[in-house]
Amino acid sequence: MFTKLDQIIEAVVNRPRKRLVVAYAQDSHTLQAVSEAVDRGIVDATLVGDPEEIGRVCRENGIDTQKFTMIAESVDVRCVEKAVRIIHEGKADLLMKGLVSTDKYMRGILNKEYGLLPPKGVLSHVVVLQFPDYPRLVLASDVAVIPAPDLNQKVAIAKYLIRTAGILGNENPKMAFVTPTEQMLPGIPSCVDAAILAKMADRGQLGPVIADGPLALDVALFEEVARTKKLSSPVAGHADCLLFPNIDAANAFFKSATKLAHAELAGMVVGTKVPCVLTSRGDSMASKLYSIALAALSAR
């Protein structure tokens, strides 16, 4: 079972390279991460963007542009369209967001003519977090895509978390359905959903997982908190996966984790025909490299 993000890179370096296509690949962190991924043998890369701007950023960072395939396009929306079409035509295995906003990136993925969402599919996002002083990787969802998932969408999100945990070597992860309290309070909708999901997990309806909820975040992650509250649970204090009730809670946790707790991350859109790297434009080069490696490890 992986406990560090570096292990994801170690797991993919000896596999056949995947073809990565990057939409609007014009920022230094993205280009540095893609360059490193190419150098390490994880991917071959196609960059869709303004060749002059890409060349300027590469020169400033000592990157040889000859290692990339270039497709010229100066408009961000058109870059996404061209990149998604390349995936749709079967000419690449992975998609990555460059210096383009998330909403434009997602619109390209969801395009009805050539987009990457299967019929009746549920699009979501999974992030893997490595904290400086925490003994294991923590998977969380959904921090970026579904604003207020209903129960059926939460079932899909749970299965994406379980699948990603399995890719990272954890075949029977512990999942917490996060709510404001570990008490079963019928007046709080997230508690009701958490209780239903926990019972579905008990009945084997979610797949190979040990799950519990409702669980407050501190109870889910810290064993001493669970002991103090005298809560008996196979998940409390040991959660590998966190399923949040909505994007407000999940995104606040995610940004607090990365900006205040200095967590590194790997993140990708799931539910698509191929893994799609989705990180913030402000994320570090290391996090973008980890995300490329996670997508490559997840690709068929």
Image (cartoon, rainbow, N blue to C red):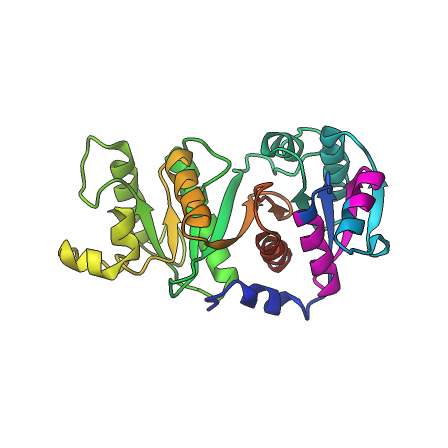
Quadrant location, the C terminus = bottom right
Q: Is residue 200 visible?
A: no
Direction from residue 12 to residue 170 in the image, left or right: left
Residue 15, located in which quarter of the rendered image? bottom right
Q: How many marks?
A: 0
Give 206 or 25, whichever is nearer the viewer.
Answer: 25
Inspect the magenta stretch and tell me whether residue 44 lies in it.
yes
Q: Residue at x 77, y 36 (%)?
A: 82
Direction from residue 80 to residue 69 in the image, left or right: right
Kindly give the residue lying farthest to the front in the view shown. Answer: 60
Q: Is residue 96 visible?
A: yes
Percent position of residue 186, x then y? 19, 33
Inspect the magenta stretch and tell me whether residue 166 lies in it.
no
Direction from residue 6 to residue 24 in the image, left or right: right
Residue 19, located in which quarter of the rendered image? bottom right
Q: Main secondary structure of the magenta part?
A: helix
Q: Where is 266 relative to 81, above or below?
A: below
Percent position of residue 192, x then y? 25, 37
- Residue range corresponding to the magenta coloring: 29-56
Direction from residue 122 to residue 20 in the image, left or right: right
Q: Residue at x 78, y 41 (%)?
A: 48
Percent position of residue 299, x then y? 63, 55
Q: Residue at x 65, y 38 (%)?
A: 116
